[in-house]
Image (cartoon, grey):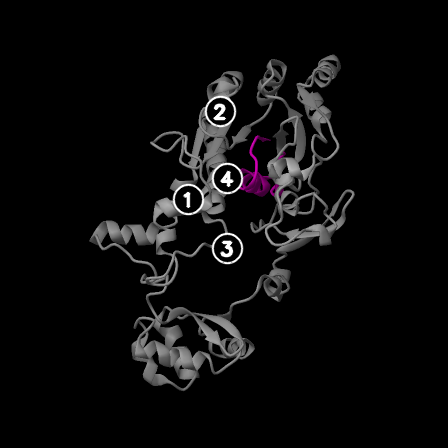
Amino acid sequence: MLDLTRLLPGGFCSLLLADLGADVVKVEDTGMGDYVRWAPPFYGSDEHQGLGTRSALYLALNRGKRSIRVDLKSAAGRDAFLDLAGEYDVVLEGFRPGVLDKLGCGYESLRAANPRLVYCAITGYGQTGPNTQRAGHDMNYLGLTGLLGMTGEPQGRPIQSAGQIADLGGGAMMAAVGVLAALRERERSGEGQLVDISMTDGALAWLAMVASAYLCDGRVPQRGDGQLNGGFLCYYPYEASDGWVTCGALEPKFWRAFCEGVGREDLIEVQFHSPGSDAWREVADVFRSRTRDEWRAFNDQHDAMIEPVLGLDEALASDLVHEREMVVELEQPSLGRLRLLGLPIKLSRTPGDATRPAPALGEHTEEVLREAGFEGDRVTALLASGAVAGPSEPVEAARFMG
Protein backbone atom coordinates (compact mmCIF):
# COMPACT_ATOMS: atom_id res chain seq x y z
CA MET A 1 0.00 0.00 0.00
CA LEU A 2 1.14 3.51 -0.87
CA ASP A 3 -0.31 5.75 1.85
CA LEU A 4 -0.54 9.44 0.97
CA THR A 5 -2.70 10.34 3.94
CA ARG A 6 -1.87 12.59 6.85
CA LEU A 7 -3.17 12.85 10.39
CA LEU A 8 -5.73 10.46 11.87
CA PRO A 9 -8.28 8.75 9.56
CA GLY A 10 -5.93 7.43 6.89
CA GLY A 11 -3.16 6.82 9.39
CA PHE A 12 -5.37 4.59 11.52
CA CYS A 13 -6.68 2.72 8.46
CA SER A 14 -3.18 1.87 7.24
CA LEU A 15 -2.08 1.14 10.82
CA LEU A 16 -4.64 -1.66 11.07
CA LEU A 17 -3.43 -3.12 7.78
CA ALA A 18 0.26 -2.71 8.68
CA ASP A 19 -0.24 -4.45 12.03
CA LEU A 20 -1.90 -7.31 10.15
CA GLY A 21 1.06 -7.70 7.81
CA ALA A 22 0.54 -5.28 4.91
CA ASP A 23 3.58 -3.50 3.49
CA VAL A 24 2.54 0.11 4.06
CA VAL A 25 4.73 2.82 2.52
CA LYS A 26 4.04 6.36 3.71
CA VAL A 27 4.46 8.72 0.79
CA GLU A 28 5.40 12.02 2.41
CA ASP A 29 6.39 15.32 0.86
CA THR A 30 9.95 16.58 0.69
CA GLY A 31 9.25 19.22 3.33
CA MET A 32 7.92 18.45 6.78
CA GLY A 33 6.11 15.22 5.89
CA ASP A 34 3.01 13.99 7.68
CA TYR A 35 1.69 16.81 9.87
CA VAL A 36 1.04 14.35 12.66
CA ARG A 37 4.81 14.04 13.19
CA TRP A 38 4.75 17.52 14.66
CA ALA A 39 1.22 17.70 16.11
CA PRO A 40 1.03 18.85 19.73
CA PRO A 41 -0.03 16.24 22.32
CA PHE A 42 -3.72 16.03 23.19
CA TYR A 43 -3.19 16.66 26.89
CA GLY A 44 -0.31 18.71 28.23
CA SER A 45 3.19 18.19 26.87
CA ASP A 46 4.86 15.01 25.71
CA GLU A 47 8.28 16.30 26.78
CA HIS A 48 8.10 14.28 29.99
CA GLN A 49 8.01 11.09 27.89
CA GLY A 50 11.30 11.96 26.24
CA LEU A 51 9.69 12.45 22.84
CA GLY A 52 10.74 16.06 22.30
CA THR A 53 9.04 17.41 19.19
CA ARG A 54 8.47 13.85 18.00
CA SER A 55 4.71 13.40 18.29
CA ALA A 56 3.49 10.48 20.37
CA LEU A 57 0.46 10.43 18.08
CA TYR A 58 2.71 9.90 15.07
CA LEU A 59 4.41 6.96 16.71
CA ALA A 60 1.05 5.45 17.68
CA LEU A 61 -0.35 5.67 14.14
CA ASN A 62 2.71 4.72 12.11
CA ARG A 63 4.44 1.74 13.67
CA GLY A 64 5.39 -0.96 11.21
CA LYS A 65 5.32 1.33 8.16
CA ARG A 66 8.04 2.61 5.83
CA SER A 67 8.52 6.24 4.77
CA ILE A 68 9.56 7.77 1.45
CA ARG A 69 9.60 11.42 0.42
CA VAL A 70 8.34 12.44 -3.01
CA ASP A 71 7.62 15.88 -4.46
CA LEU A 72 4.40 15.27 -6.39
CA LYS A 73 4.45 18.86 -7.65
CA SER A 74 7.52 18.13 -9.76
CA ALA A 75 7.23 16.21 -13.03
CA ALA A 76 9.97 13.77 -12.04
CA GLY A 77 8.37 13.15 -8.66
CA ARG A 78 4.95 12.61 -10.21
CA ASP A 79 6.37 10.17 -12.75
CA ALA A 80 8.21 8.31 -10.02
CA PHE A 81 5.00 7.98 -8.03
CA LEU A 82 3.08 6.72 -11.07
CA ASP A 83 5.75 4.11 -11.66
CA LEU A 84 5.66 3.09 -8.01
CA ALA A 85 1.87 2.72 -8.17
CA GLY A 86 2.35 0.22 -10.97
CA GLU A 87 4.05 -2.09 -8.46
CA TYR A 88 1.57 -1.77 -5.58
CA ASP A 89 -1.91 -3.11 -4.85
CA VAL A 90 -3.44 -0.13 -3.04
CA VAL A 91 -3.16 3.65 -2.94
CA LEU A 92 -4.74 5.41 0.05
CA GLU A 93 -5.27 9.17 0.05
CA GLY A 94 -7.14 11.75 2.09
CA PHE A 95 -7.06 14.96 0.04
CA ARG A 96 -10.10 16.92 -1.05
CA PRO A 97 -11.55 15.60 -4.31
CA GLY A 98 -9.58 16.80 -7.33
CA VAL A 99 -6.30 17.65 -5.59
CA LEU A 100 -4.38 14.67 -6.94
CA ASP A 101 -6.04 15.03 -10.35
CA LYS A 102 -4.49 18.49 -10.64
CA LEU A 103 -1.09 16.99 -9.86
CA GLY A 104 -1.53 14.37 -12.58
CA CYS A 105 -1.70 11.41 -10.23
CA GLY A 106 -5.39 11.01 -9.46
CA TYR A 107 -7.44 7.86 -9.87
CA GLU A 108 -7.69 7.87 -13.66
CA SER A 109 -3.95 8.40 -14.11
CA LEU A 110 -3.12 5.68 -11.61
CA ARG A 111 -5.63 3.28 -13.13
CA ALA A 112 -3.95 3.78 -16.50
CA ALA A 113 -0.63 2.89 -14.89
CA ASN A 114 -2.06 -0.10 -13.01
CA PRO A 115 -5.57 -1.37 -13.89
CA ARG A 116 -5.44 -3.74 -10.91
CA LEU A 117 -4.94 -0.90 -8.45
CA VAL A 118 -7.38 -0.39 -5.59
CA TYR A 119 -7.58 3.35 -4.98
CA CYS A 120 -9.17 4.42 -1.68
CA ALA A 121 -10.03 8.06 -1.02
CA ILE A 122 -11.07 9.09 2.50
CA THR A 123 -12.77 12.49 2.56
CA GLY A 124 -15.15 14.36 4.79
CA TYR A 125 -18.10 14.29 2.41
CA GLY A 126 -17.25 11.92 -0.43
CA GLN A 127 -16.38 12.30 -4.11
CA THR A 128 -19.89 13.49 -5.04
CA GLY A 129 -22.56 15.71 -3.53
CA PRO A 130 -22.80 19.35 -2.48
CA ASN A 131 -20.04 19.33 0.15
CA THR A 132 -17.12 17.84 -1.76
CA GLN A 133 -14.93 20.94 -1.38
CA ARG A 134 -15.87 21.81 2.20
CA ALA A 135 -13.30 21.41 4.95
CA GLY A 136 -14.30 19.59 8.09
CA HIS A 137 -13.29 17.75 11.22
CA ASP A 138 -14.82 14.93 13.24
CA MET A 139 -17.23 17.17 15.14
CA ASN A 140 -18.50 18.79 11.93
CA TYR A 141 -19.34 15.42 10.41
CA LEU A 142 -21.07 14.25 13.59
CA GLY A 143 -23.07 17.47 13.69
CA LEU A 144 -24.32 16.99 10.13
CA THR A 145 -25.39 13.37 10.66
CA GLY A 146 -27.54 14.03 13.75
CA LEU A 147 -25.29 11.93 15.96
CA LEU A 148 -23.85 14.87 17.89
CA GLY A 149 -27.31 16.38 18.26
CA MET A 150 -28.51 13.28 20.10
CA THR A 151 -25.52 12.99 22.42
CA GLY A 152 -25.79 14.53 25.88
CA GLU A 153 -28.39 15.31 28.53
CA PRO A 154 -31.97 16.29 27.60
CA GLN A 155 -32.15 20.06 27.03
CA GLY A 156 -28.40 20.22 27.62
CA ARG A 157 -25.68 21.07 25.13
CA PRO A 158 -24.42 18.45 22.68
CA ILE A 159 -21.50 16.53 24.19
CA GLN A 160 -18.35 15.72 22.22
CA SER A 161 -17.07 12.17 22.41
CA ALA A 162 -13.57 11.50 23.72
CA GLY A 163 -13.04 9.19 20.74
CA GLN A 164 -13.16 10.41 17.13
CA ILE A 165 -16.25 8.55 15.91
CA ALA A 166 -16.36 9.92 12.35
CA ASP A 167 -12.59 9.92 11.78
CA LEU A 168 -12.04 6.38 13.05
CA GLY A 169 -15.37 4.56 12.88
CA GLY A 170 -16.75 6.39 9.87
CA GLY A 171 -13.51 6.87 7.96
CA ALA A 172 -10.59 4.63 8.91
CA MET A 173 -12.48 1.43 9.59
CA MET A 174 -14.87 1.82 6.66
CA ALA A 175 -11.84 2.40 4.42
CA ALA A 176 -10.10 -0.73 5.69
CA VAL A 177 -13.23 -2.79 4.99
CA GLY A 178 -13.62 -1.20 1.56
CA VAL A 179 -10.01 -1.87 0.59
CA LEU A 180 -10.19 -5.50 1.69
CA ALA A 181 -13.50 -6.01 -0.14
CA ALA A 182 -12.08 -4.48 -3.34
CA LEU A 183 -8.97 -6.66 -3.13
CA ARG A 184 -11.13 -9.74 -2.67
CA GLU A 185 -13.29 -8.77 -5.67
CA ARG A 186 -10.14 -8.23 -7.74
CA GLU A 187 -9.34 -11.91 -7.33
CA ARG A 188 -12.47 -12.61 -9.38
CA SER A 189 -12.39 -9.82 -11.96
CA GLY A 190 -8.70 -9.01 -12.17
CA GLU A 191 -9.52 -5.29 -11.96
CA GLY A 192 -9.11 -2.66 -9.30
CA GLN A 193 -11.60 0.08 -8.47
CA LEU A 194 -12.18 3.34 -6.62
CA VAL A 195 -13.22 3.04 -2.96
CA ASP A 196 -15.03 6.28 -2.07
CA ILE A 197 -15.17 6.73 1.71
CA SER A 198 -17.04 9.67 3.22
CA MET A 199 -16.52 10.09 6.96
CA THR A 200 -19.97 11.65 7.13
CA ASP A 201 -21.54 8.64 5.41
CA GLY A 202 -19.66 6.32 7.73
CA ALA A 203 -20.72 8.19 10.87
CA LEU A 204 -24.33 8.21 9.70
CA ALA A 205 -24.15 4.43 9.34
CA TRP A 206 -23.45 4.22 13.07
CA LEU A 207 -27.05 5.35 13.59
CA ALA A 208 -28.41 2.19 11.98
CA MET A 209 -30.91 1.40 14.75
CA VAL A 210 -31.90 4.97 15.58
CA ALA A 211 -32.32 6.08 11.95
CA SER A 212 -34.30 2.97 11.00
CA ALA A 213 -36.75 3.63 13.82
CA TYR A 214 -37.23 7.22 12.66
CA LEU A 215 -37.63 6.19 9.02
CA CYS A 216 -40.33 3.73 10.04
CA ASP A 217 -42.39 5.78 12.52
CA GLY A 218 -41.36 9.38 11.79
CA ARG A 219 -40.64 10.27 15.42
CA VAL A 220 -37.62 12.55 15.66
CA PRO A 221 -35.34 11.37 18.50
CA GLN A 222 -34.25 14.03 20.96
CA ARG A 223 -31.04 14.39 22.89
CA GLY A 224 -30.88 12.01 25.81
CA ASP A 225 -34.26 10.31 25.36
CA GLY A 226 -33.39 7.29 23.23
CA GLN A 227 -33.42 3.76 24.56
CA LEU A 228 -29.63 3.54 24.53
CA ASN A 229 -28.62 7.15 25.11
CA GLY A 230 -30.35 8.13 28.31
CA GLY A 231 -34.05 7.29 27.96
CA PHE A 232 -34.20 4.27 30.31
CA LEU A 233 -33.10 4.24 33.94
CA CYS A 234 -31.95 0.62 33.56
CA TYR A 235 -29.34 1.68 30.99
CA TYR A 236 -27.62 4.65 32.54
CA PRO A 237 -24.42 5.83 34.27
CA TYR A 238 -24.86 6.31 38.01
CA GLU A 239 -22.81 8.03 40.68
CA ALA A 240 -21.31 5.67 43.23
CA SER A 241 -19.96 6.85 46.58
CA ASP A 242 -16.48 7.34 45.10
CA GLY A 243 -16.98 7.79 41.36
CA TRP A 244 -19.25 6.48 38.64
CA VAL A 245 -20.53 3.13 37.42
CA THR A 246 -22.44 1.98 34.36
CA CYS A 247 -25.69 0.09 34.63
CA GLY A 248 -26.35 -1.83 31.41
CA ALA A 249 -29.21 -4.00 32.66
CA LEU A 250 -31.33 -3.63 29.53
CA GLU A 251 -32.69 -7.18 29.45
CA PRO A 252 -35.25 -7.93 32.19
CA LYS A 253 -33.23 -10.82 33.65
CA PHE A 254 -30.28 -8.54 34.37
CA TRP A 255 -32.46 -5.82 35.86
CA ARG A 256 -34.16 -8.39 38.06
CA ALA A 257 -30.76 -9.65 39.18
CA PHE A 258 -29.81 -6.11 40.20
CA CYS A 259 -33.04 -5.44 42.06
CA GLU A 260 -33.01 -8.75 43.89
CA GLY A 261 -29.33 -8.40 44.70
CA VAL A 262 -29.85 -5.06 46.45
CA GLY A 263 -33.05 -6.23 48.13
CA ARG A 264 -35.31 -3.87 46.15
CA GLU A 265 -37.68 -6.17 44.32
CA ASP A 266 -40.13 -3.26 44.26
CA LEU A 267 -37.95 -1.60 41.61
CA ILE A 268 -38.32 -4.43 39.10
CA GLU A 269 -41.43 -2.90 37.58
CA VAL A 270 -39.84 0.54 37.01
CA GLN A 271 -37.09 -0.77 34.72
CA PHE A 272 -38.06 1.34 31.74
CA HIS A 273 -38.98 4.55 33.56
CA SER A 274 -37.13 7.68 32.57
CA PRO A 275 -34.14 9.31 34.25
CA GLY A 276 -35.36 12.24 36.31
CA SER A 277 -38.43 10.37 37.57
CA ASP A 278 -39.07 9.48 41.20
CA ALA A 279 -38.15 5.86 40.43
CA TRP A 280 -34.84 6.99 38.95
CA ARG A 281 -34.04 8.97 42.11
CA GLU A 282 -34.58 5.85 44.19
CA VAL A 283 -32.28 3.85 41.95
CA ALA A 284 -29.69 6.63 42.06
CA ASP A 285 -29.78 6.54 45.87
CA VAL A 286 -29.07 2.80 45.76
CA PHE A 287 -26.02 3.30 43.55
CA ARG A 288 -24.65 6.07 45.78
CA SER A 289 -24.67 3.66 48.72
CA ARG A 290 -21.64 1.65 47.51
CA THR A 291 -18.18 2.25 46.09
CA ARG A 292 -17.10 1.31 42.60
CA ASP A 293 -15.19 -1.68 43.95
CA GLU A 294 -18.22 -2.81 45.91
CA TRP A 295 -20.32 -2.61 42.76
CA ARG A 296 -17.67 -4.59 40.89
CA ALA A 297 -17.85 -7.29 43.55
CA PHE A 298 -21.66 -7.12 43.42
CA ASN A 299 -21.61 -7.73 39.68
CA ASP A 300 -19.19 -10.64 40.10
CA GLN A 301 -21.81 -12.26 42.30
CA HIS A 302 -25.07 -11.26 40.60
CA ASP A 303 -24.16 -10.81 36.89
CA ALA A 304 -26.21 -7.62 36.63
CA MET A 305 -24.19 -5.75 33.96
CA ILE A 306 -22.71 -3.17 36.32
CA GLU A 307 -19.16 -1.98 35.72
CA PRO A 308 -17.08 0.97 36.99
CA VAL A 309 -16.39 4.05 34.89
CA LEU A 310 -12.59 4.06 34.77
CA GLY A 311 -10.14 6.82 34.12
CA LEU A 312 -7.78 6.15 31.22
CA ASP A 313 -4.94 5.35 33.61
CA GLU A 314 -7.11 2.81 35.41
CA ALA A 315 -8.34 1.27 32.16
CA LEU A 316 -4.83 0.83 30.70
CA ALA A 317 -3.61 -0.75 33.95
CA SER A 318 -6.54 -3.18 34.17
CA ASP A 319 -6.31 -6.96 33.95
CA LEU A 320 -8.73 -6.84 31.03
CA VAL A 321 -6.41 -4.67 28.92
CA HIS A 322 -3.34 -6.61 30.02
CA GLU A 323 -4.73 -10.05 29.28
CA ARG A 324 -6.02 -8.92 25.86
CA GLU A 325 -2.58 -7.46 25.02
CA MET A 326 -4.05 -4.07 24.28
CA VAL A 327 -0.96 -2.26 25.58
CA VAL A 328 2.27 -3.31 23.88
CA GLU A 329 5.91 -2.32 24.15
CA LEU A 330 8.16 -1.62 21.20
CA GLU A 331 11.70 -0.45 20.67
CA GLN A 332 11.74 2.90 18.85
CA PRO A 333 15.18 3.91 17.51
CA SER A 334 16.66 6.90 19.39
CA LEU A 335 13.76 6.88 21.85
CA GLY A 336 14.06 3.48 23.50
CA ARG A 337 11.18 1.42 24.85
CA LEU A 338 7.71 2.87 24.32
CA ARG A 339 4.24 1.67 25.25
CA LEU A 340 1.40 1.99 22.73
CA LEU A 341 -2.06 0.54 22.25
CA GLY A 342 -2.13 -2.93 20.77
CA LEU A 343 -3.99 -4.48 17.84
CA PRO A 344 -7.71 -5.08 18.51
CA ILE A 345 -8.10 -7.69 15.75
CA LYS A 346 -7.02 -11.09 17.05
CA LEU A 347 -6.31 -13.75 14.43
CA SER A 348 -5.71 -17.31 15.66
CA ARG A 349 -3.39 -18.52 12.89
CA THR A 350 -1.74 -15.35 11.59
CA PRO A 351 -1.67 -12.89 14.49
CA GLY A 352 -0.57 -9.37 13.68
CA ASP A 353 2.50 -7.59 15.00
CA ALA A 354 2.03 -4.28 16.79
CA THR A 355 5.61 -3.98 18.01
CA ARG A 356 7.48 -2.74 14.93
CA PRO A 357 8.80 0.85 15.14
CA ALA A 358 7.57 3.86 13.21
CA PRO A 359 9.80 5.16 10.39
CA ALA A 360 11.86 8.31 10.35
CA LEU A 361 10.91 10.83 7.69
CA GLY A 362 12.17 9.53 4.35
CA GLU A 363 13.99 6.63 5.99
CA HIS A 364 13.14 4.14 3.21
CA THR A 365 13.12 6.28 0.06
CA GLU A 366 16.03 4.58 -1.72
CA GLU A 367 15.06 1.13 -0.47
CA VAL A 368 11.49 1.37 -1.78
CA LEU A 369 12.51 2.82 -5.15
CA ARG A 370 15.10 0.10 -5.74
CA GLU A 371 12.64 -2.62 -4.71
CA ALA A 372 10.21 -1.24 -7.32
CA GLY A 373 12.82 -1.66 -10.06
CA PHE A 374 14.23 1.88 -10.27
CA GLU A 375 17.77 1.79 -11.66
CA GLY A 376 20.58 3.23 -9.59
CA ASP A 377 21.19 6.15 -11.96
CA ARG A 378 17.54 7.14 -11.84
CA VAL A 379 17.45 7.02 -8.05
CA THR A 380 20.56 9.18 -7.90
CA ALA A 381 19.08 11.69 -10.34
CA LEU A 382 15.79 11.86 -8.45
CA LEU A 383 17.59 12.53 -5.19
CA ALA A 384 19.85 15.14 -6.77
CA SER A 385 16.94 17.01 -8.34
CA GLY A 386 14.89 17.06 -5.15
CA ALA A 387 12.04 15.13 -6.76
CA VAL A 388 12.51 12.61 -3.96
CA ALA A 389 14.39 12.89 -0.69
CA GLY A 390 15.87 10.60 1.89
CA PRO A 391 16.14 11.03 5.66
CA SER A 392 16.45 14.57 6.93
CA GLU A 393 16.88 16.45 10.13
CA PRO A 394 13.63 16.97 12.10
CA VAL A 395 11.56 19.95 10.99
CA GLU A 396 10.77 22.40 13.75
CA ALA A 397 7.33 21.87 15.21
CA ALA A 398 6.73 25.62 14.99
CA ARG A 399 6.34 25.27 11.22
CA PHE A 400 3.30 23.07 11.79
CA MET A 401 1.80 25.41 14.35
CA GLY A 402 2.35 28.47 12.18
CA neighbours of label 2 inside 10 A, class few (<14), some (14 to 19), many (20+): few
**CA distance separating discs 4 and 1:** 22 Å
- Choose the circle earlier in sequence order: 4 or 1: 1
Q: Amino acid at mark 1?
A: Asn
Looking at the picture, tell me which residue is in the foreground, 303 or 196.
196
Disc 4 + disc 1, Cβ < 8 Å: no
Whether residue 143 is visible to the viewer of this picture, yes or no, is: yes
The percent coordinates of residue 281 (x first, y second) are: 36, 78
Seen as rendered, the residue at the extreme left is 217
Q: Which residue is mark 1?
A: 140
* Element type where label 2 sits in the image: helix
Q: Amino acid at mark 4?
A: Ala
The percent coordinates of residue 293 (x first, y second) are: 56, 77
Q: Is residue 22 magenta?
A: yes
Q: Which residue is mark 4?
A: 176
Residue positioned 78% across, 43% down in the render: 334
The mark closer to the camera, 4 or 1, is 1
